Image: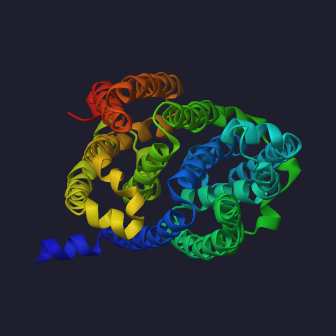
Amino acid sequence: MNFLKNIVSSQLFKITSLNSISVLIKIGIGLITSKVLAIFVGPTGMALVGNLRNFLTSVESVSTLGFQNGIVKYVAENEEDNLQFKKIFSTLFFSLLTVTIVISSTLFLFANYWNQVVFGNNLEYSYVFKVLAIVLPLYASSLYLVAIINGLGRFKAVIYINIIGNIIGLFVTLLFIWKWLVLGALLAIIITPSLLFFVTVRYISKEISIKNAISFSLFDFKIIKNLSHYFLMALVSGIFGPIVFLVIRNQIIDTVGIKEAGFWEAMTRISTYYLLFVNTLLTVYYYPKLVLAKTNEETKLVFWSFYKNVLPLFAVGLFIIYLFRGIMIKILFTQDFEPVSDLFLWQLVGDFLKAASWILGFQFFAKKMTKSFIVTEILSLLILYFSSIYFISIFKIEGVVIAHAFTYGIYLLVLGIYFRKSLV
């Protein structure tokens, strides 16, 4: 009885429970938006949505300089040092503002070029990139402020922000798809995250005075230098990663078909929903603990807390998802998406391996292990690209999920060997 009381009263249980509610809300919203996308834009539109999502991820990484994880680390370490905290806040504010203005100008002036890169020569959605240019400063600022809140250890606030953002996003997405179909779906992907800015400002203003925290005289180039490691990391995972996915999807479109590319995007959306639980929990709860861990023994406790408390539950969840995949497809999509059922097995295997490797991968960010991260990330991206091309040529669309499982199996093995001192 006392054992149960200790579990229920623990911080991990409280954060996990609140996080679960947030994830369930996002999944519920995802169910609705996926169904609407399936009905109004079909597999073809789904493939285009996937391409834009990958492009937006790259833009996000560049516009925030990949500093999110670094912000969490430095804010967590300097929360009690008021002057240093203000230096971090001001330095990041002016740096990100400058970068987003440059990127926004590039997106707006060369909208036609970006349209060809993402959607090809036969589709005209350059207007989407002009809208992205306008809302990007708000989008980047919201990511920056959420990282500040996370670094302050306000886990509940981060989760509440996500919940509110998801609800706002639902109404915007439904309205836009209803009004403009594929164009509406593309615009919703861009505009929804930017609206989160207004929510984050409300929460951050409860913790600090933004007006008093921002001053150009507090700009400190040493902070940018220290955070440059995170930019190099983001350059690989946040820019090259989405580009690899974009190239793979275009390869599927060219060799198998655009409908099949839409099936893979549908599977990826489902995967994204259930991986939210693990990803959010890692970002909000485990990553700050890895930052503060000073010894191998302390790091080991964090690693095994995840493997003992989270990963088994995740495995059970994946098994249930596999059993009810047919029903899930009918609920989420339409009859046109039935072939997605064939993609579940290897996708779920790959996602289990991905979750197991994530906690180890976060150690790269927590300890600024830049070179090691870049080497392992480039290795995994190369394996994913070449194995996808190879398996697609043999197994068609199913080959891409086989490559997914194959890649994360090797990635987990490599990280397990690299961090073996913190595991055994």
Q: Position of residue 237 (x, y in %)?
A: 54, 35
Q: From this view, report whether residue 389 is shown above or below residue 122.
A: above
Q: Residue at x 29, y 34 (%)?
A: 422
Q: From this view, report whether residue 96 is shown above or below residue 162.
A: above
Q: Position of residue 189 (x, y in %)?
A: 64, 59
- Residue 393 lies left or right of residue 243; in this view the side is left
Q: Residue at x 43, y 25 (%)?
A: 389
Q: Quadrant of the C terminus?
A: top left
Along the line of sight, the residue nearer the viewer: 150 or 83: 150
- Residue 294 lies left or right of residue 416; in this view the side is right
Q: Residue furthest left?
A: 1
Along the line of sight, the residue nearer the viewer: 299 or 285: 285
Q: Residue 357 falls in which quadrant of the image?
A: top left
Q: Residue at x 75, y 69 (%)?
A: 209
Q: From this view, report whether residue 275 is shown above or below residue 178.
A: above
Q: From this view, report whether residue 207 is shown above or below residue 394.
A: below
The reply to whether residue 281 is in sight is: no
Q: Residue at x 49, y 24 (%)?
A: 378
Q: Residue 152 falls in which quadrant of the image?
A: bottom right
Along the line of sight, the residue nearer the viewer: 69 or 273: 273
- Residue 324 lies left or right of residue 62; in this view the side is left
Q: Position of residue 261 (x, y in %)?
A: 48, 43
How many tags in the picture?
0
The reply to whether residue 418 is in sight is: yes
User: By what rule are the colours in the image chosen?
Assistant: rainbow
Q: Position of residue 308 (x, y in %)?
A: 20, 52
Q: Quadrant of the N terminus?
A: bottom left
